[in-house]
């Protein structure tokens, strides 16, 4: 995995950590619209992270 991929994964993981806190607070306030939007953003970031990891894994295994 190269430095750019590691930096991107680190940024994504930081965002996901912040999203987790947002979801908790939206849940406590029963703010379904903001929670839905945040969960959609989390999903997008998780897909991006998986793509980075899969690309790196494919390069190492082939």
Image (spheres, grey):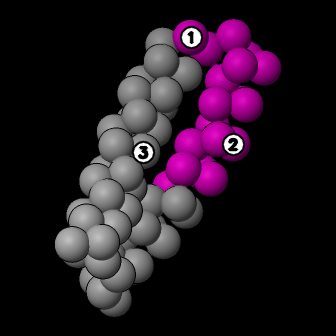
Residue 19 in view in this figure: yes
1 vs 3, front mark: 3
Q: Are marks 3 and 2 in contact (CB under 8 Å)?
A: no
**Around disc 1, counting alpha carbons within 10 Å, would you say few (fewer than 14), some (14 to 19), or many (20 or more)?**
few
The magenta stretch is: 15-32
Task: Answer yes or no: is residue 34 visible.
Answer: no
Distance between mark 1 and mark 3 Cα atoms: 21 Å
Which residue is identified by label 3? Answer: 46
Q: Which mark is residue 60?
A: none
The location of residue 14, given as percent across then percent down, is 55, 62
For this view, does 33 lie left or right of residue 26?
left
Quarter location, residue 31: top right
- The structure residue drawn at horizontal position 21% and vertical position 72%, both measured from the top left corner, is 62
Q: Which mark is residue 21?
A: 2
Residue 7 position, x and y percent, is: 39, 79
Lower position in the chain sequence, tag 1 or tag 3 = 1
Q: Is residue 39 left or right of residue 51?
A: right
């Amino acid at each position: 995995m190269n430095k750019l991929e590691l930096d991107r994964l680190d940024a994504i993981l930081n965002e996901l950590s912040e999203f987790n806190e947002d979801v908790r607070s939206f849940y406590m306030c029963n703010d379904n619209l903001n929670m839905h939007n945040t969960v959609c953003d989390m999903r997008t970031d998780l897909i991006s992270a998986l793509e980075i990891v899969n690309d790196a894994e494919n390069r190492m295994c082939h």
